[in-house]
Image: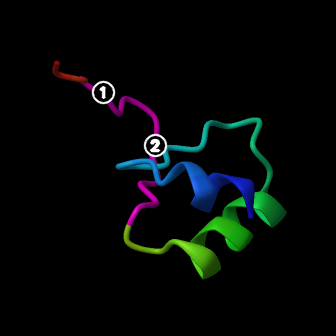
Amino acid sequence: MAVRERNPDYIIPEHCTGMNTIIALHREMPRKLVMPSTGTRVIFGA
């Protein structure tokens, strides 16, 4: 999985990602997956 090679701190799928991809990400990298919902705010720091 190409995402695993990049080793992101978090993976935050959006509404257009699709359930199959979200399930695959959860299976491969469960601790990095953050599931947003309506109103979720994500703040990135430098």
Mark 2 or 1, which is nearer the eye?
1
Identify which residue is drawn at 45% across, 34% down: 38
Snapshot quadrant of residue 32: bottom left
Q: Does the magenta stretch include residue 33?
A: yes
Total tally of numbered discs in the picture: 2
Sort mark 1 into few (<14), some (14-19) or many (20+) by Cα contacts within 10 Å. few
Q: Where is residue 18 drawn, in percent x and y?
A: 80, 50
Q: What residue type is labelled 1?
A: Arg
Per the image, the residue denoted by label 1 is 41
- Give above or below for 13 relative to 39: below
Sort mark 2 into few (<14), some (14-19) or many (20+) by Cα contacts within 10 Å. few
Q: Where is residue 23 drawn, in percent x and y?
A: 70, 71
Q: Nearer the viewer, residue 21 or 6?
A: 6
Q: Does the magenta stretch include residue 39?
A: yes
Q: Where is residue 42 drawn, in percent x and y?
A: 31, 28
**Quarter in which the N terminus is drawn:** bottom right
Side (left or right) of 10 relative to 27: left
Q: Which amino acid does label 2 sit on?
A: Ser
Q: Where is residue 40 drawn, in percent x and y?
A: 35, 33
Per the image, the residue denoted by label 2 is 37
Identify which residue is drawn at 59% across, 61% down: 4
Identify which residue is drawn at 46% across, 60% down: 33
Q: Which residue is most to the bottom?
A: 27
- Give above or below for 38 relative to 7: above
Report helix, strand or loop for mark 2: loop
Snapshot quadrant of residue 41: top left
Report helix, strand or loop for mark 1: loop
| Dominant secondary structure, magenta | loop
Task: Please provide the residue range marked out in magenta.
Answer: 32-43
Q: Nearer the viewer, residue 10 or 20?
A: 10
Q: Which residue is most to the left?
A: 46
- Give above or below for 40 relative to 8: above
